[in-house]
């Protein structure tokens, strides 16, 4: 697979993840506890991946187990903490704060893997942060204690996602993507199960609208978790962690658009911030030196 193909598939992941914030909100509004949401997502995810890759999974090595647990643990904590934080915020606010993980990915890669970011990467990240500020609208947001706690949890989830993306991009390439994906689902189920029962928050949705509840669970379990994370793990073998993080931050932009469809108002902040983030992704992905050489070659002709 070529890099641009991997990046296009990651863009599809960002679109589906953007819609996931709305479906999480539907389940939260129906009375379902955050831990139960991620537990069911993880259960569906792990069953799907085991069914698809059981031949690889039963032959995994000790190294595969280690890689799977680290990748799965950071991913599971990210989604669980995010769901808890979203219970105190709107879906658009949650999706937009999640985008801030783009700041942490190059830092993690630099500290852990000694990959110094290129100058254009620094500019791309700065632009993405500016776009995120437009989207989050931090300066006029809710400053209540509940909202601040929710924002803090959402920010913590971004750190976990950043570690996960950096790890997938640099340490998982020797382990089969099906094995890694299975552990991402299994650890999500186990960690969420533990949190739900220790905290005593095991509420399931009310039965006032069973169809929308079932559709929401299936969207989160089959599409947002199983499909998207298998694609993510596979595609990150063919692109850099920083490129993946910049593309995946567009889930916040799409989350804002889907939230508009769900009933929230669309604002100029969403439009301006989304455009800035898209430009930052293009800045990171365009090979300016190659483009410059091609232009010189065309002039000579």
Image (cartoon, helix red, strand yellow):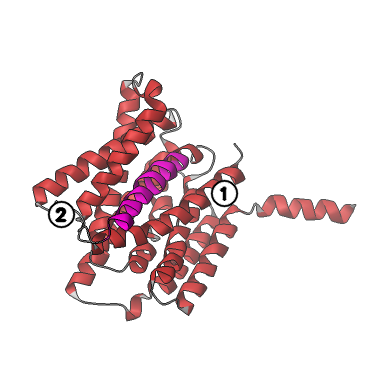
Q: Dominant secondary structure of the magenta stretch? A: helix
The residue to which callout 2 is attached is 203
The residue to which callout 1 is attached is 8
Q: Please give the label number shown on residue 129.
A: none
Task: Kindly indicate the quadrant of the structure image that contains residue 138.
Answer: bottom left
**What percent of the width, then of the height, locates residue 225?**
37, 45
| Dot 2 crowding, Cα within 10 Å, few <14, some 14–19, many 20+ | some
Considering only order in the chain, which callout, 1 or 2, is on the residue closer to the N terminus? 1
**What percent of the width, then of the height, locates residue 185?**
31, 39
Residue at left offset 37%, top offset 42%? 112
| Dot 1 crowding, Cα within 10 Å, few <14, some 14–19, many 20+ | few
Q: Is residue 220 left or right of residue 30?
A: right
Task: Kindly indicate the quadrant of the structure image that contains residue 299.
Answer: bottom right
Residue 103 visible in this rendered orientation of the protein = no
Depth order, front residue of 260/102: 260
Residue 251 among those drawn in magenta: no
Q: Which residues are magenta?
A: 209-232
């Amino acid at each position: 697979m070529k890099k641009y193909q991997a990046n296009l598939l990651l863009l599809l992941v960002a679109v589906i993840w953007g819609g996931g914030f709305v479906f999480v909100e539907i389940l939260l509004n129906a009375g379902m506890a955050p831990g139960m949401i991620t537990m069911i997502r993880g259960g569906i995810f792990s069953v799907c991946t085991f069914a698809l890759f059981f031949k690889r999974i039963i032959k995994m090595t000790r190294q595969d187990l280690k890689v799977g647990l680290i990748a799965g643990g950071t991913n599971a904590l990210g989604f669980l903490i995010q769901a808890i934080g979203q219970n105190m915020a709107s879906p658009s606010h949650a999706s937009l704060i999640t985008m801030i993980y783009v700041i942490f990915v190059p830092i993690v890669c630099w500290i852990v893997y000694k990959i110094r970011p290129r100058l254009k990467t620094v500019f791309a990240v700065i632009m993405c942060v500016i776009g995120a500020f437009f989207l989050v609208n931090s300066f006029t947001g809710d400053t209540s204690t509940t909202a601040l706690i929710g924002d803090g949890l959402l920010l913590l989830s971004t750190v976990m996602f950043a570690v996960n993306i950096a790890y997938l991009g640099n340490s998982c390439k020797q382990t089969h993507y099906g094995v890694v994906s299975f552990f991402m689902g299994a650890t999500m189920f186990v960690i969420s199960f533990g949190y739900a029962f220790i905290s005593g928050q095991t509420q399931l949705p009310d039965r006032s609208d069973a169809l929308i509840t079932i559709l929401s669970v299936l969207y989160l379990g089959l599409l947002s978790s199983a499909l998207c994370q298998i694609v993510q793990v596979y595609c990150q073998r063919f692109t850099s962690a920083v490129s993946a993080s910049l593309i995946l931050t567009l889930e916040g932009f799409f989350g804002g658009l889907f939230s508009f469809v769900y009933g929230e108002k669309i604002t100029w902040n969403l439009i301006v911030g989304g455009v800035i983030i898209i430009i930052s992704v293009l800045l990171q992905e365009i090979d300016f030196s190659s483009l410059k050489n091609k232009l010189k070659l065309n002039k000579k002709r």
